[in-house]
Image (tube, rainbow, N blue to C red):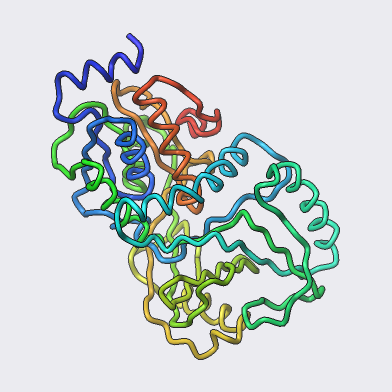
C-alpha cells in the first residue's frame, strides 16, 4: 500500500490523520502544511508553543555562502524564497505578528584576502540565486547601522531576512488553530516527531547510537529602535533589529553546559562585543537575557524522514541555527512524504546520514 493510501485508511479510522509531537517551528510548519492539504491535524506539546529553542529571540534567516553548491544549500535557498510568502501568510491567518522582514544582511570585509572572495561570491550568487536575490560588494554609507570594516567595504545580500522567533512560533500555533488544528494529549494517526533536543536524545537511545545532540545558545535583547534596518553578521555575532523596538544580539554555541536555561558571563561578552561594533547600542539597556538548547544532528543538516524502526512515525529535527529559514520548505517536504508518499528529501537530510 502506498503512503498516500495508508493516509486515506487512517483518515477513515481515526479522529486525527496526523499527530505532530512538538510545537516548535519545525513541528508547526509540518502541521500547517498538512492542514493546507486538507488533513486533520493535532499537535501535542506539554510545554506549549515556543517553549523550547523556538522560543528564542535572535531570528536571523541567513543563507549559506553562494559557493560549493549542494542540495542542502539549494533546499535552503528555495525555503528562504518561500519564506517571503509563508511568513506574511502566517500573519494573515493568525492575526498575529511574526516580526518577519526581508531586509537583507550586511557583513564587513575585514581582511584584504576577503575582497576577491566577496567579489567571486557576488558572481556566483548572480547565477545560483536565479535573479531572486543578490550578493553585492558595497561602500559604507556612514549610517549608524553599519559595522566597522578594516577594508572600507561591506557585503550586502538580499536573500537574508529576519523575524522574532518566539512571536513567529506563537503566530504559527494560532494559525494552526485558525485552520482547524487542535492541541491535544493523545497520539492518533500518523505521527511526526519534532521534539527537538529531547527527541534527538530519545532517538539516540532507540537506535543505540548518537544521532545528534543539543547545543546551548545565549542571546540578549537590547532596547533600541533599528526597525527596517538589515541584520548584521560580523565576527560570528548576529545583530538583529526587531520590529518592536528591540535589537537581538547573539549567540553562543556551547556543547558542554550544566544548566540549559541560565545565562552567564559568556552572554556579557556577546553584549559587550555588540556595543563595541555598533556604538548606537552603547547605552541601550538589556531588556531580556535568554538561553536555550538547539537541536543539532550529527550530519549538521536538518533530519527528516521515516523513523528507522517505527512504522507510521516520521522525524523532523535538527534545525539548529537554520531551522526558521528552512521551516517553510521542510513543512511542505514532510507533507509530501507523510500524506502522499512523495520523497523529495536530500540524502544528507535523512536519519541514516547521522548514523
Q: Which residue is pictured at 31% across the width and 60% down the height?
A: 96
337 relative to 265, above or below: above
Residue 256 percent location from the top left of the image: 44, 59
Report the number of numbered marks.
0
Q: Is residue 142 left or right of residue 33?
A: right
- Asked whether 259 or 220 is in front, the reply is 220
In this view, the residue farthest toward the front is 92
Q: Is residue 70 left or right of residue 81?
A: right
- Asked whether 218 or 14 is in front, the reply is 14
Q: Quadrant of residue 315?
A: top left
Q: Which residue is pictured at 17% across the width and 18% down the height?
A: 12
Q: Which residue is pictured at 80% across the width and 62% down the height?
A: 114
Q: Is residue 266 left or right of residue 54?
A: right
Residue 259 percent location from the top left of the image: 33, 64
39 relative to 272, above or below: above
Residue 293 percent location from the top left of the image: 39, 57
188 relative to 288, above or below: above
- Is the N terminus in the top left, top right, bottom left or bottom right quadrant? top left
Residue 34 percent location from the top left of the image: 32, 34
- Asked whether 147 or 213 is in front, the reply is 147
In this view, the residue farthest toward the bottom is 283
Amino acid at each position: 500500500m502506498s503512503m498516500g493510501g495508508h493516509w486515506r485508511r487512517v483518515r477513515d479510522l481515526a479522529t486525527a490523520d496526523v499527530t505532530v509531537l512538538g510545537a516548535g517551528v519545525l513541528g508547526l510548519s509540518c502541521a500547517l502544511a498538512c492542514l493546507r492539504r486538507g488533513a486533520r491535524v493535532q499537535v501535542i506539546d506539554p510545554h506549549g508553543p515556543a517553549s523550547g529553542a523556538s522560543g528564542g529571540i535572535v531570528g536571523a534567516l541567513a543563507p549559506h555562502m553562494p559557493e560549493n553548491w549542494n542540495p542542502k544549500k539549494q533546499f535552503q535557498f528555495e525555503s528562504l524564497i518561500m519564506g517571503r510568502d509563508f511568513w506574511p501568510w502566517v500573519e494573515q491567518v493568525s492575526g498575529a505578528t511574526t516580526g518577519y522582514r526581508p531586509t537583507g544582511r550586511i557583513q564587513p570585509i575585514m581582511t584584504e584576502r576577503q575582497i576577491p572572495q566577496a567579489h567571486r561570491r557576488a558572481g556566483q550568487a548572480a547565477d545560483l540565486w536565479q535573479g531572486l536575490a543578490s550578493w553585492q560588494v558595497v561602500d559604507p554609507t556612514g549610517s549608524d547601522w553599519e559595522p566597522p570594516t578594516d577594508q572600507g567595504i561591506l557585503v550586502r545580500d538580499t536573500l537574508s531576512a529576519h523575524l522574532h522567533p518566539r512571536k513567529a512560533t506563537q503566530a504559527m500555533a494560532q494559525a494552526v488553530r485558525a485552520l482547524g488544528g487542535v492541541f491535544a494529549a493523545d497520539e492518533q494517526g500518523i505521527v511526526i516527531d519534532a521534539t527537538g533536543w529531547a527527541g534527538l536524545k530519545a532517538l539516540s537511545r532507540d537506535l543505540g547510537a548518537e544521532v545528534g545532540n543539543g547545543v546551548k545558545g545565549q542571546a540578549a535583547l537590547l532596547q533600541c529602535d533599528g526597525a527596517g534596518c538589515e541584520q548584521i553578521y560580523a565576527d560570528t555575532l548576529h545583530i538583529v533589529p526587531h520590529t518592536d523596538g528591540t535589537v537581538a544580539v547573539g549567540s553562543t554555541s556551547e556543547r558542554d553546559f550544566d544548566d540549559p536555561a541560565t545565562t552567564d558571563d559568556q552572554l556579557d561578552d556577546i553584549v559587550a562585543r555588540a556595543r563595541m561594533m555598533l556604538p548606537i547600542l552603547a547605552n541601550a539597556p538589556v531588556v531580556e537575557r535568554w538561553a536555550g538548547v538547539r537541536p543539532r544532528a550529527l550530519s549538521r543538516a536538518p533530519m527528516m524522514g521515516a523513523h528507522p524502526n517505527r512504522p507510521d512515525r516520521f522525524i523532523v529535527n535538527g534545525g539548529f541555527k537554520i531551522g526558521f529559514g528552512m521551516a517553510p520548505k521542510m513543512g511542505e517536504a514532510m507533507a509530501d512524504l507523510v500524506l502522499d508518499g512523495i520523497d523529495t528529501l536530500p540524502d544528507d537530510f535523512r536519519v541514516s546520514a547521522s548514523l
